[in-house]
Image: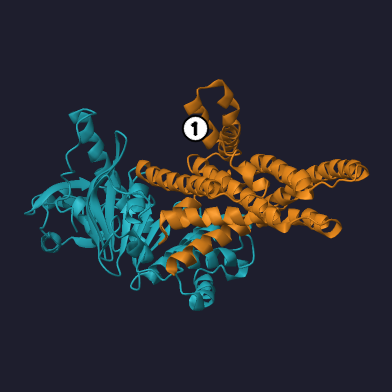
Chain colours: A orange, B cyan
Amino acid sequence: MDSVRNVLAIAGKELRSYFASPMGYILIGLFALLFGAFFRVYLTGFAQRSQQMAMGGGNINVNEWMISGVLHNAAIIILFIMPMITMRTYAEEKRSGTMELLLTSPLTDVQIILGKFLGAMGLFAAMLVVTAIDIAILFRLGNPEWKPVVIGYLGLLLLGGCFLSLGLLISSTTKNQIVAGVMTFGVFLLLWIVNWFADSVGPTTREVLNYLSITAHLEDFTRGILDTKHIVYYLSFITFGLFLTAKSVDSERWRG
Amino acid sequence: MIEVQHVTKKYGRVTAVDDVSFRVERGEILGFLGPNGAGKTTTMRILTGYMPATEGKALVAGYDVFTHPIEAKKRTGYLPEAPPLYPDMTVREYLDFVARIKGVPPADRKTRVTSVMQRTRVADMADRHCSKLSKGYKQRVGLAQALIHNPEVLILDEPTAGLDPKQIIETRELIRGLAGDHTIVLSTHILPEVAQTCQRVVIINNGRVVAVDTPENLTARLAGSETMYVQVDALGEEAGPVLATIAGVTRVQASASGGFEIESERGTDVRRDIAKTVVTRGWGLLELRPMRMSLEEVFLRVTTKEEEGKDTNGPDSTPAPSPVIGSVNG
């Protein structure tokens, strides 16, 4: 009970700090704007296509032709925005000396890490919730299936979780926010494109690269397919990232 | 209440703290004195569980800070050198957050925050952002943060650094008022502070404890010999040679103010004999008082002795513990 309270105290502090500065609002606004832009592009495309189809007497699926594409592009925006959420989490605490407060309080490292992770997830969830406005318009005007949409959003949430856990890890290794941000972005990008090289290597390596690629696992989610394999991948990715963050904080402690 | 046993801390090959041991009794204020870079902050960080020691162990309220960190930390309030404030929180929000993570029960939180703000006189800034506070207020909010969970042990790293003289006096009074309920360790490199606030002093230099005692004893014992200041009206006679003949007196030196500084062997009190001599000669005794080294002199002597030892042994050998003071385990 105590540990839950501690985690929530840290999470609440993190969340509040995002909104105490313009940062939280800027990130949410930026995400909503970019998401809306992609949404509009896809909507126009979808409208034209469905008109053409209607003339031929057919019908196209809005989930398949529109929502999945929008969500896929949302993942790209997430790639760019996530480093901005995590870059300050540990780096800033170390620079300002508040790390000393946290580490000398009756909290375990895991409680601090989980709190920070949940706080960042909270901001990310808020970003996703704002985009639900666009999706709501679709529901108002058309007749999409809601299940694939929910699964798609779950995929984005899990993908975001991976980025956040990795971002926390990188932030925990440096005092410098900018270094943390740039490095996080670099590593994200690498994980993103790792399967682009899959074609030029042997079959075994290809399998490994495809599995490692953080976006390959999103594919099914955006299509509305819920596969345990991908959930396991994302959840283990998150756990591993947080575990390494705990190790990083602990080793920092030993090195002083 | 606090026990530090043979604590050593190495950063790579650099030894920041070398076999430090001391005890602090319940309700006591212990001054931790040393030049900058002597290892004060490192020792305090080990005591608060911020970092583990390379060797040795530290106990707070009976709990080993390494094996039972949560229990030890619940009983410790810590003010680091730079007050650990979140710039975008107001003082009240900040203290509320600290109360949460220090495990103050939810029902008591509000009253604790209010009472601690009053105690440290920051209540008038309760709704101001921490980033907008003056240095003095920041320091006091830092102190409020350390007190919020009413800990048995308070570790204060240079609590008066950067304050103006009035604030320094207020802070010292506040700290003195906390003793009794709390066991306090405070570090400083300002000597009068120790003399005014602390009951016992640990002097640390180059990571080693070079002296432990009360401020008074330190100054007295360190002198090595007793020194009296005497001013007499010798009615035209030469007083110096006469005073030098008194049993136990080792040296008589005329001082600039017209009197004499009389050194005697340690443990002997020559005041009676001085008075008797003066009276039997028919001189007038104008002044007779013991002279003590100021803490500054003690400090310089203790810390420079160490340096000299180092020089003669070469840079790589560890210097022998200072011979000046015998007991190092209070």
Q: Is A73 in front, or is B10? A: A73
Which quarter of the picture shows residue B230?
bottom left
Q: Position of residue A76 (x, y in %)?
A: 68, 39
> Under tag 1, what secondary structure?
helix
Name the residue beneath numbered marker 1.
A208
Chain letter of mark 1 equals A
Identify which residue is drawn at 43% across, 55% down. Answer: A110
Q: Quadrant of the C terminus of chain B?
A: bottom left
Q: Residue furthest right?
A: A55
Q: Is B119 in front, or is B299? A: B119
Identify which residue is drawn at 21% across, 27% down. Answer: B314
Task: Judge whether residue B224 can be spotted in this image.
Answer: yes
Q: Is A234 in front, or is B301? A: A234
Q: Position of residue A38 (x, y in %)?
A: 79, 42
Q: Residue furthest left?
A: B247
Identify which residue is drawn at 85% across, 40% down. Answer: A45
Above or below: residue B27 compared with residue B56: below
Q: Position of residue A255 (x, y in %)?
A: 36, 41
Task: Judge whether residue B164 can be spotted in this image.
Answer: no
Count numbered badges in the picture.
Answer: 1
Q: Residue furthest front?
A: A57
Which quarter of the picture shows residue B280?
bottom left
Classify residue B63 as left or right of residue B161. Answer: left
Q: Position of residue A245 (x, y in %)?
A: 45, 46
Bin the neighbour count of mark 1 within 10 Å (Cα to Cα): few under 14, some 14-19, many 20 and up.
few
Q: Quadrant of the N terminus of chain B?
A: bottom left
Which quarter of the picture shows residue B207?
top left
Q: Is A238 in front, or is A43? A: A43
Classify residue B87 as left or right of residue A250. Answer: right
Query: What amino acid is labelled 1 in the image?
Result: Val
Q: Residue furthest top?
A: A200
